[in-house]
Image (spheres, rainbow, N blue to C red):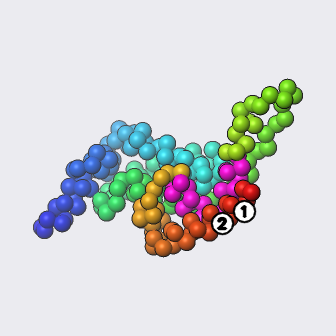
């Protein structure tokens, strides 16, 4: 065995805590799946919520993602970080669920009788952004969410989506132009 395969295996199962935990999941350790959930569910849920546009759907896709991780943990080969691998699994689950389903529109905030801004009015900016994201094609929306809301680099996004880095940059460029027009 050459050093590269030893290093790859150590990276996949020994050096990084998430890789060790994922190896335990592959071995059938349910508590290890709980550890991964605790470490990554917030970021994965945020990603899925922005793709789905609906909390309930995002929660269901997150559960589908965990089931898929449980079933496929042994396929992790250490070629990317565990986090990148998890985002890829979540993305595939989202695509399976959302194929052909347009994202729901955000609800209109109700009017307050006392003219004092409440939480709904304070969240209008966030709602406008969510509505603008919902107007993007799914391919552009997922690149924007991964880049700006999950703070991933172009290379990591390319790995998660299985596309070239140039395509990531192109989708970001077109998404920015669309968002600028919608948010004006």
What kind of secondary structure does the magenta stretch mostly adopt? helix
Residue placed most toward the observer, 69 or 137: 137
Quarter of the figure with residue 160? bottom left
Secondary structure beneath label 2: helix
At x 28% / y 45%, what residue is drawn?
Answer: 17
Task: Say the numbered circle drawn on residue 84.
Answer: none
Task: Say the numbered circle drawn on residue 177.
Answer: 2
Secondary structure beneath label 1: helix
Mark 1 nearby-residue class (10 Å; few <14, some 14–19, many ≥20): few
Residue 19: where, in percent of width, then height? 30, 50
| Count of marks overlaid on the render | 2
Quadrant, the C terminus = bottom right
Q: Is residue 162 magenta?
A: no
Residue placed most toward the observer, 91 or 112: 112
Mark 2 nearby-residue class (10 Å; few <14, some 14–19, many ≥20): few
Q: Is residue 36 left or right of residue 172?
A: left
Q: Is residue 140 magenta?
A: yes
At x 21% / y 59%, what residue is drawn?
Answer: 9
Residue 181: where, in percent of width, then height? 72, 62
Quarter of the figure with residue 81? bottom left
Work out how far the residue at label 2 is from the one at label 1, CA to CA, in angstroms.
Answer: 6 Å
Query: Quick check: can you spot residue 62?
Result: no
At x 41% / y 56%, what residue is drawn?
Answer: 84
Quadrant, the N terminus = bottom left
Residue under circle 1?
181
Q: Is residue 115 left or right of residue 105?
A: right
Question: Answer yes or no: do the residues labelled 2 and 1 have beta carbons within 8 Å?
Answer: yes
At x 68% / y 64%, what residue is drawn?
Answer: 178
Residue range corresponding to the magenta coloring: 127-148
């Amino acid at each position: 065995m050459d050093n590269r395969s030893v290093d790859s295996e150590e990276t996949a199962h020994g050096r990084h805590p998430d890789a060790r935990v994922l190896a335990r999941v592959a071995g059938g350790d349910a508590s290890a799946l709980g550890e991964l959930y605790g470490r990554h569910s917030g970021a994965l849920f945020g990603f899925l919520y922005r793709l789905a546009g609906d909390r309930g759907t995002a929660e269901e896709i997150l559960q589908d993602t965990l089931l898929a991780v449980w079933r496929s943990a042994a396929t992790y080969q250490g070629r990317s970080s565990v986090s990148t691998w998890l985002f890829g699994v979540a993305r595939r689950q989202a695509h399976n669920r959302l194929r052909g389903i347009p994202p729901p529109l955000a609800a209109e905030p109700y009017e307050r009788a006392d003219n004092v801004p409440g939480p709904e009015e304070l969240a209008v900016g966030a709602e406008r952004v969510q509505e603008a994201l919902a107007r993007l094609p799914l391919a552009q929306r997922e690149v924007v969410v991964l880049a700006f809301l999950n703070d991933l680099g172009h290379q990591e996004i390319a790995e998660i989506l299985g596309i070239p880095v140039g395509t990531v940059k192109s989708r970001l460029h077109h998404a920015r132009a669309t968002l600028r027009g919608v948010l004006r």
